[in-house]
């Protein structure tokens, strides 16, 4: 069975073999494998930036409305990095959603700025529909992880899925599998 959702599940309680998650995983009872680094991008439409001004510094974003991702936990913020250290800038969230593609659609409507994985915004940044800002301050240590419970004897299916994910994230193909 494949279940797709944006909520954090309790793998043991819900009988889930593996979960793919972005960001840090604090549950010490899980085995975590890094699959791929995830680049974040802060962007908005050219008309939004023209109306509200292009931020030159991180603190300039305090004057902007930002679309927020509700599963990130805590008060709305934009994750930045300053001198190699995490810096979470508290912001006013104009709209909150639990799905990044919904936030990208709202940003494309010119409602606000959004901070999302760059891969989701790439088609729009390539054609200029969304314009990134403050790239030099975006965090560099965010990863897509595979998390699973510690078990003495993981199933062959789980081991095969982990191998497939690792190969595909490196840009490999099915023929690269052992």
Image (spheres, rainbow, N blue to C red):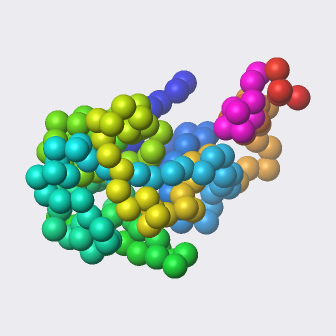
Q: Is residue 97 left or right of residue 94?
A: right
- Residue 134 appears in which quarter of the rendering? bottom left
Q: Residue at x 75, y 24 (%)?
A: 173
Q: Is residue 79 left or right of residue 103?
A: right
Q: Does 177 sit above or below residue 18?
A: above
Residue with the most extreme right position: 178
Q: Residue 131: image x %, image y %?
A: 32, 46
Q: Residue 162: image x %, image y %?
A: 72, 38
Q: Is residue 73 left or right of residue 169?
A: left
4 or 171: nearer the viewer: 171
Residue with the most extreme top position: 175
112 or 135: nearer the viewer: 135
Which quarter shows the N terminus? top right
Q: Does 34 sit above or below residue 62?
A: above
36 or 14: nearer the viewer: 36
Q: Is residue 148 magenta?
A: no
Total residue callouts: 0
Q: Residue at x 68, y 51 (%)?
A: 33
Residue with the most extreme left position: 51
Q: Residue at x 63, y 47 (%)?
A: 36
Which quarter shows the C terminus? top right
Residue 25 makes an appearance in the image: no
Q: Residue 109: image x %, image y %?
A: 17, 36
Q: Is residue 168 magenta?
A: yes
Q: Residue 108: image x %, image y %?
A: 23, 37
Magenta-tinted stretch: 167-174
Residue 164 makes an appearance in the image: yes
């Amino acid at each position: 069975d494949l279940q797709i959702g944006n909520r954090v599940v309790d793998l043991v309680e819900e009988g889930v073999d593996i979960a793919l998650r972005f960001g840090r995983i604090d549950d010490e009872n899980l085995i975590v494998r890094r699959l791929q680094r995830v680049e974040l991008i802060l962007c908005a439409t050219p008309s939004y930036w023209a109306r509200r001004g292009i931020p030159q510094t991180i603190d300039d974003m305090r004057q902007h409305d930002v679309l927020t991702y509700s599963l990130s936990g805590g008060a709305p913020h934009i994750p930045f990095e300053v001198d190699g250290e995490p810096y979470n800038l508290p912001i006013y969230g104009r709209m909150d959603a639990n799905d990044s593609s919904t936030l990208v659609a709202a940003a494309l409507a010119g409602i606000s700025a959004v901070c999302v994985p760059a891969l989701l915004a790439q088609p729009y940044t390539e054609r200029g529909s969304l314009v990134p800002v403050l790239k030099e301050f975006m965090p560099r240590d965010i990863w897509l992880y595979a998390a699973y419970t510690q078990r003495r004897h993981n199933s062959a299916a789980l081991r095969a899925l982990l191998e497939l994910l690792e190969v595909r994230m490196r840009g490999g193909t099915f023929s690269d599998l052992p």
